Image (cartoon, rainbow, N blue to C red):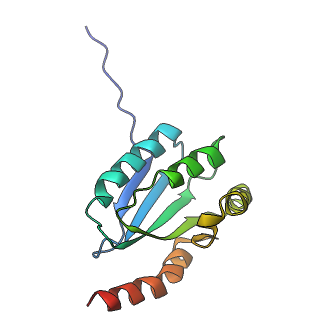
Amino acid sequence: MSKSKTIRPVDVILIWDDAAQMILHYVFRDGWAWNDFHQAMKQASSLTQQAQGRTLHSVLDFTAAPSIRAGAFYHFSQAANQLTDTYARGQIIVVSASPILWAIIRVTAILLPQFAKNLSHVPTLDAAYAALRPSINSELETQF
């Protein structure tokens, strides 16, 4: 009798948050690992190939993942440096109430100032959408 395989669910999920496909929403679930994040980044690279010239925003949602993994600064900064140039980088909003994650964002902003102007931290998903609304509305108006 062969052993049955246990398939581990993906703990970083990537979805489009809007019909215009301007907001990539990364949902980090409790128990996520760096492999999950890197898989989501590969998926994002594939999805964004169609975004020629558009502005894309990212929401990194840690509301369901109360802890941050060791190596966060390294992995997130590497991911930021590998983003494709086929689209304009919009806002990157991190959603979390974690003071540790807030500190990592502040360090990232200091060490990678090219991302500081687009990087922000909010405690709730509603606050993230409120922060994105002016940019999205403005970009949609200029497209039509």
Can residue 68 be seen here?
no
Give the percent coordinates (x, y) of residue 46: 30, 52
Split into 4 quadrants, where in the image is the N terminus? top left
Q: In which quarter of the image is residue 23?
A: bottom left
Give the percent coordinates (x, y) of residue 24: 40, 64
For this orientation, the residue located farthest to the top is 1
Q: Residue at x 74, y 59 (%)?
A: 103
Instruction: Give left or right: position of 138 versus 71.
Output: left
Q: Is residue 40 above or below residue 111?
A: above
Q: In this view, does 43 lie above or below 9?
A: below
Give the percent coordinates (x, y) of residue 62: 56, 58
Split into 4 quadrants, where in the image is the C terminus? bottom left
Q: Which residue is drawn at 68% across and 57% down?
A: 101
Q: Which residue is drawn at 40% across and 52% down?
A: 13
**Could you tell me how many numbered marks the image carries?**
0
Q: Which residue is drawn at 29% across and 86% down?
A: 143
Q: In this view, does 105 lie above or below 141?
A: above
Q: Quadrant of residue 19?
A: bottom left
Can residue 82 be seen here?
yes
| Residue sitting nearer the eye, 68 or 50 | 50
Give the percent coordinates (x, y) of residue 132: 49, 79
Instruction: Give left or right: position of 57 versus 121.
Output: left
| Residue sitting nearer the eye, 2 or 134 | 134
